[in-house]
Each structure stands twice: as structure tokens, then as C-alpha cells.
Amino acid sequence: MTSPLATFDPKYDLKLEREIDVPVHLVWKAWTTPAHLKEWFVPKPWSISACEIDLRPGGVFRTVMRSPEGEEHDNAGCYLDVVPQQRLVFTDTLLPGFRPAPNPFFTGALILTPVGSGTRYTALAIHGNEETRDSHEKMGFHDGWGTVATQMVDYIKSGAVA
Amino acid sequence: MTSPLATFDPKYDLKLEREIDVPVHLVWKAWTTPAHLKEWFVPKPWSISACEIDLRPGGVFRTVMRSPEGEEHDNAGCYLDVVPQQRLVFTDTLLPGFRPAPNPFFTGALILTPVGSGTRYTALAIHGNEETRDSHEKMGFHDGWGTVATQMVDYIKSGAVA
């Protein structure tokens, strides 16, 4: 069963798109394995102190981001659409079991396409209105998501994701 | 792929459960065909003036409820989990394409189990907090969802759903 993704709307949404020279199947593993995701998912020197993944619609996707000073930010949500090595959609709008979340902010979509032995890597942040889009942009969406994409590629190239 | 449904939590959620003497496959059709759904989905003399169904995760589920005086209420959301004749989960927390919605309220789940030639019919309203649960209850959840279940059974028994 295919899912209709939101059409990317520049008024509401943010997008990071780049070609990376690591293969799709390792990118998928890096995104869907807690032990791997913890190594690259937040710009250093921040770190991920906890990660839970139940890779199915309604299953938990939770990360705890830890500042260099030790302050922790808990981000809980669930997956919505899981097509291995192609598409991963998740949201903080719903908690596991599709329960409405207290602080809905965005839906994220990762779209992977093989390009030779590399990957076209597209990450979307889908928002409900312009204000949320703009605040996400001001929080540093492009720098942040770009930095972690680079960290992920470096991590995969280190040979850690087999 | 199976989905973990929210465990029913009486503190947050509401439930209508009954056994009805119409078969599962006709209940499924009544819920997933706009022309049928319009005939029973709101307590009469209210009516459904429009209904859109794209029966897949992220696909639109929209109904427009019309009061006897002609006032219209537009309810837009999307499906989250679709297992034909077993389970239908939808929410107003996300719009089609999983875009965060402006007025998130609840996730609905319909669970159908065959019992002889009839159906155990379970409808859940899953909320994010007690306040939303209580306001949904005060809006008349039990009367409303009970009335439309009865209307649905009568409509199916009329022979209209083949």
C-alpha cells in the first residue's frame, strides 16, 4: 500500500536534498538502528543519550538530545509510513499507538533514491502553517539537518554500519 | 505490517462496544464508501453533505456535517492504518499527506471481529489528555456514536449495502 506524501510546499515546508556517496541500504540502517542513529543524529558536541525505534506505523520513534552541559530534550513520536530503503515518515504530532501528542510540531519524511552506488538523500519537514515553518527555519533547520547528514556520511564511511 | 494500537486507557479514551447482527464485510463497506457513509454517519436530522475517502495511510478522510438549519462543519483528517474488514484508524491530528492539522482533537479506531454471522463492533476515541476526553464525552460521545451505530445497522439491514 503506497502513501500519498504531502506535496512539498515551500510556503509550509523545509527540504534538505543532496547526493551522498554512500549506498541506500547503509543510510537506511543508520536511520533505523538506535546504536547507529545515536552516533550522528544531532550536531556535535550535542549527543543522543537515548533512542527507541519500533519500525512500523504507530511504533515509537524517540530520541533524547543532550546538550554539552547535560541538559536533555526528549522528542517522542511515532512512525507513519515505513518502506524499507525508500521512505520513512514519522511525526511528533502523534505518540506511539497514534495518540495525539501534547506539543505537535512537524512530520518528517526521509526519501532515498539510489544514484549509481550513492544515494539521493531528501529530508522533508512538513508543517501545518507558515509560522511553524519559519520558526523551524530560525531554529537552524538547514545548518542542523545538513550537519547531521554530513556526520551520518562520515559515520557510514568509517565502516561502523555494516 | 501490523500496527500497535494505543492500549485503551479509560483516563484518556472513550469506547463504544456492541455486538451487531450484520456481517463484518458490510460494516466495512458502510464505513469506507462515501455514498454509504453519508446515509448514517451523523445522528439525524443532521446530515453529511460531503465525504471524501482515500483509503490508505495518509489518504484523506473528510466529512462535512450539516445541521438541520444548514450550518456546515468540515472535519478533515487522514487514515493511519487500514486493514480491510479488521481495523480502520484515522485522525484529525494530521491532514492528508500527514501534514499537521490546525485543530488536532482525536484519533479514531474501528475494530471489527466476526461473531457468528454478526460483528463485534468496537469504536475507540483516543485523546492526548483527560481534558480532551472529558470534553468529547460532554459533547455526547456515547449517545452520538451509539446513535450512528444503530443508524448504520438499520441502513445495512435495509439492503442498501450490497
Image (cartoon, coloured by chain):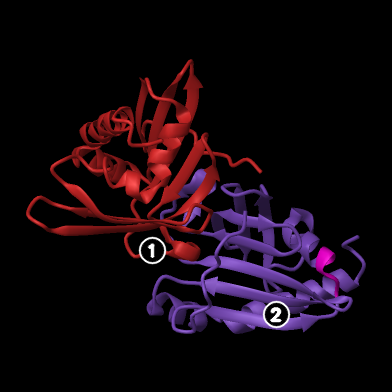
Chain colours: A red, B purple
Q: Is residue B82 above or below residue A154?
A: below
Question: Is B25 a magenta residue?
Answer: yes
Q: Secondary structure at mark 2?
A: helix
The part of the chain drawn in magenta is B22-26
Reading the image, the residue beneath label 1 is A101
Task: Classify mark 2: residues with Cα within 10 Å, few (<14), some (14-19) or many (20+).
Answer: some
At 85% from the left edge and 74% from the top edge, which residue is drawn? B22
The residue closer to the viewer here, B131 or B19, is B19
Residue displayed at 89% across by 63% down:
B160
- Three-letter amino acid code at disc 1? Ala
Taking the spot 41% from the left edge, 35% from the top edge, the residue there is A162
Residue B74's spot in the image, x, y percent? Answer: 55, 57
For residue A108, say whether it is visible.
no
Q: Label 1 vs label 2: CA separation? A: 29 Å
Q: Are the residues flagged by discs 1 and 2 from a single subunit?
A: no
Disc 1: CA contacts within 10 A as few (<14), some (14-19) or many (>=20): many
